[in-house]
């Protein structure tokens, strides 16, 4: 995300994309070995990478009840981004606007105890202690591309479960059309909140059918480990066909509404960041093209930009959610 200058029908993942964990692991290893050879000549240059080469890792995920299943997203054949890149090149404005700021500053975030409140037009509102929230469904590992509106992307193995499991449990009422995600805004622990770059708390939203789509993930881990603070611990959203800013971090409230939520980036610059924010190479951001992207980790001297895919490559799964909509107007 850039700070403005100049003034201050559901479908399941395609069966061909559901990969048993062991097979995926082998492929990942193979891709890594292949990439390692090719990358030997390339120079990794992006700023901050060297400085943050040593990222603290929060540790393994606790074993959770329920069968462990693995569902891989559409990005399984791509090399996953190195952990240290995924955990040191972040957008989390509550901890600063520089990409390196969250990894430096987010150690102050207190993630225990943590409660997520569910309210709004819903039959069973309530407060969930994090431990209880995580037990609602079996954990899955999903490899998703994350495409940022700024023009970079990563491929990350997330751990979590489909948000739809929670939504079904709390039973939205007939008039619920949208879901709002409120994230933590704590002045004492989040230095970025002092800045007025966004209207805090950071709020994001989805249409109810988007929230119910099986690809929409409530994530609490990545790379088989607990989420690092800078990646949105202890629980965040990952919506892989939308620009990264829809994937709200450190969620404290999930609210079902009749009205379209007023989201943080839309409030900051409505002409730049629409409610839908589906990844779309044909709809330019007003200040830059969205046709290509830079894959983090492939940014050596000779690295070519990649073509951005419609719905970030998830068109087969989510395209029909937007059938008949003018995607240039509903950006
Ligand atoms: N959530 C909160 N609470 N605050 C933020 O600033 N940034 C968003 C999103 N979620 C953000 C947030 C943006 S712009 C992106 S691109 C992704 O988080 C980045 O996620 P990552 O750091 O795990 O790659």
Image: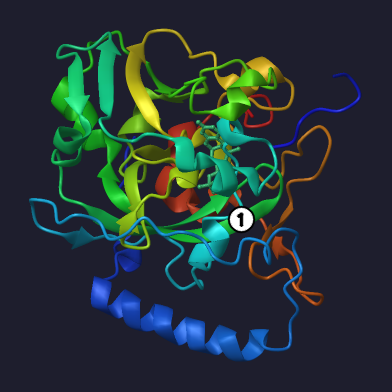
- The residue to which callout 1 is attached is 153
Q: Nearer the viewer, residue 241 or 328?
A: 241
Q: Is mark 1 within 8 Å of ligand 1?
A: no
Q: State whether residue 167 is above or below residue 216.
A: above
Q: Nearer the viewer, residue 279 or 302?
A: 302
**Helix, strand or loop status at disc 1:** strand
Q: Nearer the viewer, residue 227 or 309?
A: 227
* Residue lying at the far right of the rendered structure: 6
Q: Assign ligand 1 to one image quadrant.
A: top right
* Residue lying at the far left of the rendered structure: 66
Taking the image as shown, residue 21 lies to the left or right of residue 54, namely left
Taking the image as shown, residue 320 lies to the left or right of residue 132, namely right
Q: State whether residue 231 is above or below residue 298.
A: above
Local packing at callout 1 (Cα closer than 10 Å; few below 14, some 14-19, many 20+) is many
Q: State whether residue 207 is above or below residue 230.
A: above
The N terminus appears in which quarter of the rendering? Answer: top right
Q: Where residue 8 sits in the image (x, y, percent)?
A: 85, 19
The C terminus appears in which quarter of the rendering? Answer: top right
Taking the image as shown, residue 291 lies to the left or right of residue 266, namely right
Residue beneath the point at 66% across and 84% down: 39
Residue beneath the point at 69% across and 17% down: 196
Q: Quadrant of residue 245?
A: top right
Q: Quadrant of residue 113?
A: top left
Q: Where residue 81 sits in the image (x, y, percent)?
A: 53, 66
Residue 242 visible: no
Q: Where residue 193 sits in the image (x, y, percent)?
A: 59, 22
Q: Where residue 321 sits in the image (x, y, percent)?
A: 43, 34
Q: Nearer the viewer, residue 228 or 165?
A: 228
Taking the image as shown, residue 172 lies to the left or right of residue 42, namely left
Q: Quadrant of residue 183?
A: top left
């Amino acid at each position: 995300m850039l700070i403005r200058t100049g003034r201050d029908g559901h479908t399941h993942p395609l069966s061909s994309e559901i990969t048993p964990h062991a097979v995926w692991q082998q492929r990942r290893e193979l891709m890594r070995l292949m990439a390692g050879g090719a990358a030997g000549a390339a120079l990794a240059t992006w700023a901050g990478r060297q400085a943050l080469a040593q990222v603290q890792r929060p540790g393994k995920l606790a074993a959770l009840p329920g069968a462990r299943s693995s569902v891989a997203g559409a990005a399984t054949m791509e090399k996953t981004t190195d952990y240290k890149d995924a955990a040191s090149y972040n957008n989390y404005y509550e901890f600063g606007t520089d990409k390196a700021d969250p990894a430096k500053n987010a150690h102050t975030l207190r993630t225990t105890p943590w409660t997520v409140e569910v309210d709004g037009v819903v039959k069973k509102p309530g407060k969930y202690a994090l431990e209880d929230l995580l037990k609602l469904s079996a954990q899955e590992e999903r490899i998703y591309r994350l495409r940022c509106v700024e023009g970079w992307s990563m491929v990350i193995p997330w751990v979590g479960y489909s948000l739809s499991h929670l939504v079904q449990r709390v039973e939205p009422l007939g008039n619920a059309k949208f879901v709002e995600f409120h994230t933590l805004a704590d002045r004492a622990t989040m230095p970025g909140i002092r800045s007025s770059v966004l209207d805090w708390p950071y709020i994001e939203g989805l249409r109810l059918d988007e929230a119910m789509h099986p690809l929409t993930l409530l994530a609490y881990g990545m790379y088989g480990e607990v989420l690092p603070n800078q990646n949105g611990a202890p629980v965040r959203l990952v919506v892989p066909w939308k620009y990264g800013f829809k994937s709200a971090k450190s969620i404290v409230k999930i609210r079902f509404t009749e009205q379209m939520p007023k989201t943080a980036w839309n409030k900051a610059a409505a002409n730049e960041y629409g409610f839908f924010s589906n990844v779309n190479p044909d709809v330019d951001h007003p200040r830059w093209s969205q046709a290509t992207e830079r894959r983090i980790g492939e940014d050596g001297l000779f690295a070519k930009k990649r073509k951005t895919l419609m719905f970030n490559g998830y068109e087969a799964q989510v395209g029909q959610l937007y059938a008949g909509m003018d995607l240039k107007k509903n950006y």
